[in-house]
Image (cartoon, rainbow, N blue to C red):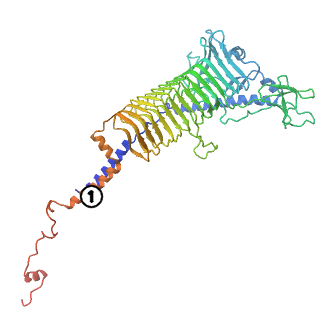
């Protein structure tokens, strides 16, 4: 065998070892994304979102500025009015004692809020409820249907800014909000040119017995039904004080009340700039007597800050985002059904805290069913369902907002305290539940049916608890912990009908009291660094290569007290070969083979036979013939002496 052939052999064995190693690594499938949007449509929708933000900010700034200036300007904006800008007309509803109702919108909107022959209303103007205002949409005499104009090149919105929006229906007469294209006389199902939406910026949104259909586009705030506070919530509301005249001569600025209570019992303080402000907080207009007979007026316009919400007994269909919530506190969703969202079903974004989601169902979203993104904390999902969504059923992220230095100086701490309890994920396109990072997150007493994997925990999550769950018929793995998970507890789960029931890769967990049924590859499999992992008291059943697979793991792990009577080891000849044919084993085999073959080459066919003694190396050499000196001399060109 030539040296070149030997080199080729060793290279082939090395390649085989590498292939064997890669084939042993069980990798998760790539994350499917929401359908991509063509570049032109994406740019158009993004521009429309910017225009909407600008219109809302301009409307708020105009209102605030006029109140701050006082005089005729303030008088004009203290009553409902229509504000015009480059981005459309807006019906502005400033604060007043009584809430604004449907009859008020019909009166104020004139031809832009018209009642139709079928009893429904068509809204053709943007509505902006200012700080402290109350907007109530309900109809006691029958069902209320509001069709929000949403046509090519034009759409409207209802936005509350520090206001209270209440949509009150009943089981017999729900309130219905839908986009409306007057040309096709149907709901608008195209989002490329924008679409009508409902949004509460700060303040509150309360909705009960409502039907919401085909609202929203592109972003979370314009996604359909949105509750958004400020990105960086503060403890105290921002106070914008209107001029109330200079203080009386000799008056000393003070932090204590300097005027008598008004008729509402509220007191004012004299600020260093000579203006009065409410001493107790509150949003109402206050009139006082400054002691000289002059009447003074002060306003408090709270900043958007945290939003609160309560949505119950509501059905939402075909929104971009079914429900989008950010910078909120103590928001509650109960008995809500979200279907056919273009992105995610229910999304809680940054700084959404202390929320509860109960008996809520999300079906057929193109993205995930429920999403708790980075920055959410102490959110509880109970008794809810995620079915046939394109991505995960439930996604919980406790990752920090930054991994290192950032321009905005975001905190490096992880978030946690959220949980999925007694809920169901069925036949979702990716995972049933995915947890990424975070502290003390949990999935308990829930059921996961189908999907690529059941419950997946990753990205340095710490203290995660996965307990009392039922997982059935996952295509790859039931419960998977990977990529730096530490101090996890996997207990009391029942996993059946999957390849690998419990899978750890570079993770540490206590795996105890679980029941595995009908696994077809491994009941429990450890890969990579498994230091500190404990596997105790599990009942493992199925038929596959091994019940507990630790041959690919490193680090100390403890395995004891597991019942494997129900496991049938089906490892055949080739399976055993694969177990032995690890990359390093194959490489060493190639090296040894090279040495052996080289030795065999040295023993040619004419070499010593088996059983013979080794002989002198020159034994078989022929002796040189003795020739006369005359011949030698002739060959050398010499004539022997004495010859002529």
Which quarter of the rendered picture does the N terminus lie within? bottom left
Q: Residue at x 7, y 81 (%)?
A: 628
Q: Position of residue 223 (x, y in %)?
A: 59, 27
When the figure is inspected, residue 622 is found, relative to residue 600, above or below; the finding is below
Q: Is residue 64 left or right of residue 146?
A: right
Q: According to the image, label 1 marks what residue? A: 595
Q: Is residue 619 left or right of residue 490?
A: left
Look at the image and tell me whether residue 442 can be seen. yes
Query: So how many labels did they put on this image?
Result: 1
Q: Position of residue 164 (x, y in %)?
A: 69, 23
Of residues 464 and 302, the one nearer the viewer is 464
Looking at this rendering, what residue extends furthest in the bottom direction? 642
**Quarter residue 347 falls in:** top right
Q: Is residue 123 left or right of residue 24?
A: right
Look at the image and tell me whether residue 343 can be seen. no
Q: Position of residue 354 (x, y in %)?
A: 62, 30
**Quarter residue 116 falls in:** top right
Of residues 547 and 544, the one nearer the viewer is 547
When the figure is inspected, residue 2 is found, relative to residue 475, above or below; the finding is below
Q: Residue at x 45, y 37 (%)?
A: 511
User: What is the secondary structure assignment of the residue under circle 1?
Assistant: helix
Which quarter of the rendered picture does the C terminus lie within? bottom left
**Quarter residue 111 falls in:** top right
């Amino acid at each position: 065998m030539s040296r070149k052939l030997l080199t080729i052999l060793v290279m082939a064995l090395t390649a085989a070892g590498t292939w064997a190693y890669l084939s042993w690594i069980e990798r998760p499938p790539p994350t499917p994304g929401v359908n991509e949007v063509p570049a032109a449509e994406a740019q158009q929708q993004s521009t429309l979102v910017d225009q909407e933000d600008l219109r809302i900010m301009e409307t708020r700034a105009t209102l605030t500025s006029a109140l701050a200036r006082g005089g005729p300007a303030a008088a004009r904006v203290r009553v409902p009015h229509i504000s015009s800008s480059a981005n459309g007309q807006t019906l502005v509803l400033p604060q007043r004692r009584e809430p604004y109702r449907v009859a008020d919108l019909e009166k104020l909107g004139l031809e832009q809020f018209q009642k139709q022959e079928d009893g429904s209303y068509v809204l053709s103007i943007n509505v902006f409820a200012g700080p402290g205002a109350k907007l109530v949409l309900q109809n006691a005499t029958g069902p209320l249907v509001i069709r929000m104009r949403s046509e090519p090149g034009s759409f409207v919105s209802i936005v509350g800014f520090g206001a209270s929006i209440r949509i009150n229906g009943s089981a017999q007469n729900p309130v219905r909000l839908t986009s409306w294209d007057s040309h096709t006389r149907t709901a608008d199902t195209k989002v490329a040119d924008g679409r009508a939406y409902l949004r509460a910026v700060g303040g509150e949104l309360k909705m009960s017995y409502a039907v919401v259909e085909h609202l929203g586009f592109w972003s979370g705030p314009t996604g359909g039904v949105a509750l958004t506070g400020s990105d960086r919530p503060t403890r105290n509301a921002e106070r914008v004080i209107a001029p109330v005249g200079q203080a009386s001569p000799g008056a000393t600025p003070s932090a204590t009340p300097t005027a008598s209570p008004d008729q509402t019992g509220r007191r004012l303080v004299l600020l260093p700039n000579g203006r009065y402000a409410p001493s107790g907080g509150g949003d109402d207009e206050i009139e006082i007597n400054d002691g000289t007979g002059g009447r003074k007026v002060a306003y408090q316009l709270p900043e958007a800050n945290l939003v609160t919400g309560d949505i119950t007994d509501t059905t939402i269909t075909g929104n971009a985002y079914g429900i989008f919530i950010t910078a909120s506190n103590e928001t509650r969703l109960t008995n809500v059904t979200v279907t056919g969202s273009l992105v995610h079903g229910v999304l809680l974004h940054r700084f959404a805290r202390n929320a509860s989601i109960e008996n809520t169902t999300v079906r057929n979203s193109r993205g995930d069913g429920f999403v708790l993104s980075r920055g959410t904390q102490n959110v509880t999902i109970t008794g809810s369902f995620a079915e046939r969504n394109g991505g995960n059923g439930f996604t919980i992220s406790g990752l920090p907002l930054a991994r290192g230095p950032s321009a905005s100086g975001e905190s490096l701490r992880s978030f946690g305290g959220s949980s999925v309890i007694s809920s169901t994920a069925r036949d979702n396109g990716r995972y049933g539940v995915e947890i990424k990072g975070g502290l003390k997150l949990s999935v308990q007493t829930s059921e996961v049916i189908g999907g690529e994997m059941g419950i997946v925990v990753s990205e340095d999550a710490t203290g995660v608890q996965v307990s009392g769950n039922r997982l059935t018929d996952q295509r790859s793995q039931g419960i998977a912990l990977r990529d730096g998970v530490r101090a996890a507890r996997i207990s009391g789960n029942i996993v059946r009908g999957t390849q690998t029931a419990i899978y750890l890769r570079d993770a540490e967990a206590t795996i105890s009291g679980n029941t595995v049924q009908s696994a077809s590859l491994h009941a429990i499999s450890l890969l990579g660094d498994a230091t500190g992992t404990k596997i105790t008291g599990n009942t493992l059943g199925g038929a596959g290569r091994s019940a507990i697979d630790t041959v690919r793991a490193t680090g100390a792990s403890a395995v004891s007290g597991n019942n494997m009577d129900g496991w049938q080891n089906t490892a055949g000849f080739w399976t055993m070969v694969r177990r032995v044919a690890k990359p390093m084993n194959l490489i060493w085999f190639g090296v040894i083979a090279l040495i052996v073959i080289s030795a065999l080459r040295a023993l040619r066919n004419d070499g010593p036979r088996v059983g013979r003694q080794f002989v002198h190396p020159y034994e078989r050499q022929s002796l040189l013939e003795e020739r006369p000196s005359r011949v030698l001399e002739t060959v050398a060109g010499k004539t022997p002496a004495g010859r002529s």
